[in-house]
Amino acid sequence: MIPKYEQIKQELLSEIRNHKFIPGDKFYSEADLKKKYNVSSITAVKSLNELTNAGYLYRIQGKGTFVSKSKVAKSVKFSDIENHTLDAETIKVLSVEKENEPEILKELGLNESDYYYKIKRVRSVKGAPFLVHITHLPVKLIKEPVNDFSKFDSVYDYVRKEFQIDLYSLSSVETNEIVFPENAEILNLLNMSFREPVVKQVKHSYLPDRSVAEYIISYKHWKYFKTKIEVDAE
């Protein structure tokens, strides 16, 4: 059975896509949705949060919720362009550590008493490091004890083999921003100076039950970052 908040979300999304609301329009409030669908505040807020997190809505404190000015009615495809072939890459696993830092537990949706594994890797091409991955996996996706770090050359292959879960096919949310890292370890791993920028990529992937499967922070050397954007016509 589809949860009520999901039913409401899909109906609201249909209204946006059918241009009942245009970009910049003020959207339904929590109170509007409670009255319109006869639901609780929790259900109404969850529906709005889902659409906001997906980029269809945005909020202005004290003013309300508005329809995003992005091309929500179109299919937009973002893809990284690599300047080298995959067979030219090498991957080195630097560490695999079991931790329970509160900040990361929150990102993974775990309790304070839970644990996760932090897997730190660096990718290089022709001996030049260009990408540092810091992957956080809940303990349920790790087979203990962890003795062989080489199993994590590809985290996705490891999870597919051990748990029959294809992380590539999961829903995910990723953000990219240009930053000047202050972390000396990241700069050293990428052979960069503090005057050079990196692309910080933060990604959450979600299992079908909406629990977090992975939380990844990556730092990519600016020389190796290139993105293609494709927009389908309506």
Image (cartoon, grey):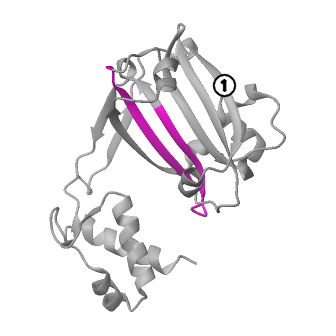
Residue drawn 46% across the image and 73% down it: 6
Residue drawn 61% across the image and 64% down it: 209
Q: How many marks?
A: 1
* Up/down of 70 relative to 226, above or below: below
Residue drawn 32% across the image and 81% down it: 30
Q: Which residues are magenta?
A: 195-218
Quadrant of residue 51 in the image?
A: bottom left
Q: Nearer the viewer, residue 184 or 199?
A: 184
The residue to which callout 1 is attached is 93
Task: Tell whether 14 sits left or right of 99.
Answer: left
Residue 102 falls within the magenta-colored stretch: no
Quadrant of residue 45 in the image?
A: bottom left
Q: Amino acid at mark 1?
A: Val
x, y percentage for residue 172?
49, 50
x, y percentage for residue 93?
66, 25
Residue drawn 51% across the image and 49% down it: 204
Task: Give the secondary structure at mark 1.
Answer: strand
Task: Tell whether 43 sits left or right of 122.
Answer: left
Image quadrant where one finds the N terminus: bottom right
* Up/down of 232 relative to 229, above or below: below
Quadrant of residue 159 in the image?
A: top right
Task: Tell whether 104 sits left or right of 60.
Answer: right
